[in-house]
Amino acid sequence: MANLFGEFVCKLDAKGRFMLPAGLFRQLLPGDQERFVINRGFEKNLTLYPVSEWQKITREINSLNLYNKKNREFVRYFYRGASELSCDSSNRILLPKPLMDYADLEKEIVLFAFGNRIEIWSKTLYESTMSVEPEDFSVLAEEVMGRINNKEPEA
């Protein structure tokens, strides 16, 4: 599994291409440096997956019971707009126009890498989203991370 991390500000050219930053490119496994799948993110952003990670996620999604209405709805929204992308000879990635419109991407974008994915945000939206700090980050950390290994936080 990939363990990507970092925050990278990039510029989109007139065609909707951005250059994959060297610091992020080096984190990708050799087989994952050229092919990606992109889809809509859970917020108003895009999510870029190395192809090997996308394959793992789709195996998990394909195991859902499609007789369940919520599962069908999730699958439709998750795959909506999904597209395979590849880097050109200059390590640039061309974003599909409908997805750019969905995420309001213009000149400057932020690539926020974590785990097995790279979120692509409008720089303006990313800054406004991340400027809203949780009131008490330590409480949020305890609520989220305190459940790892089935450990509940102590009351």
Image (tube, helix red, strand yellow):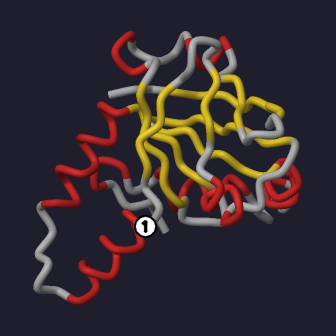
**Residue 71 image offset from top left, x and y in percent:** 25, 78
Identity of the residue furthest to the front in this view: 15
Q: Using the image as rendered, state which of residue 38 and residue 13 is in the foreground.
A: 13
| Amino acid at the residue labelled 1 | Arg
Position of the N terminus by quadrant = top left
The image quarter in which residue 13 lies: top right
**Residue 12 image offset from top left, x and y in percent:** 80, 37
Q: Which residue is at a point 52% across and 27% down the rendered structure image?
A: 4
Residue neighbourhood size for the residue with mark 1, other residues' Cα within 10 Å, grouped as few (<14), some (14–19), many (≥20): few
Q: Is residue 19 left or right of residue 33?
A: right
Q: Which residue lies under the disc numbered 1?
A: 80
Q: Which residue is at a point 54% across and 65% down the rendered structure image?
A: 42
Identity of the residue furthest to the bottom in this view: 69
**Residue 123 image offset from top left, x and y in percent:** 84, 48
The image quarter in which residue 51 lies: top left
**Residue 52 image offset from top left, x and y in percent:** 30, 31
Judge whether 31 appears above or below 105 on screen.
above
Judge whether 22 appears above or below 155 on screen.
above
Q: Using the image as rendered, state which of residue 152 and residue 148 is in the foreground.
A: 148
Q: Is residue 140 left or right of residue 153?
A: right
* Kind of element beneath mark 1: loop
Judge whether 28 appears above or below 117 on screen.
above
Q: Which residue is at a point 37% across and 63% down the rendered structure image?
A: 79
Q: Is residue 153 left or right of residue 46?
A: left
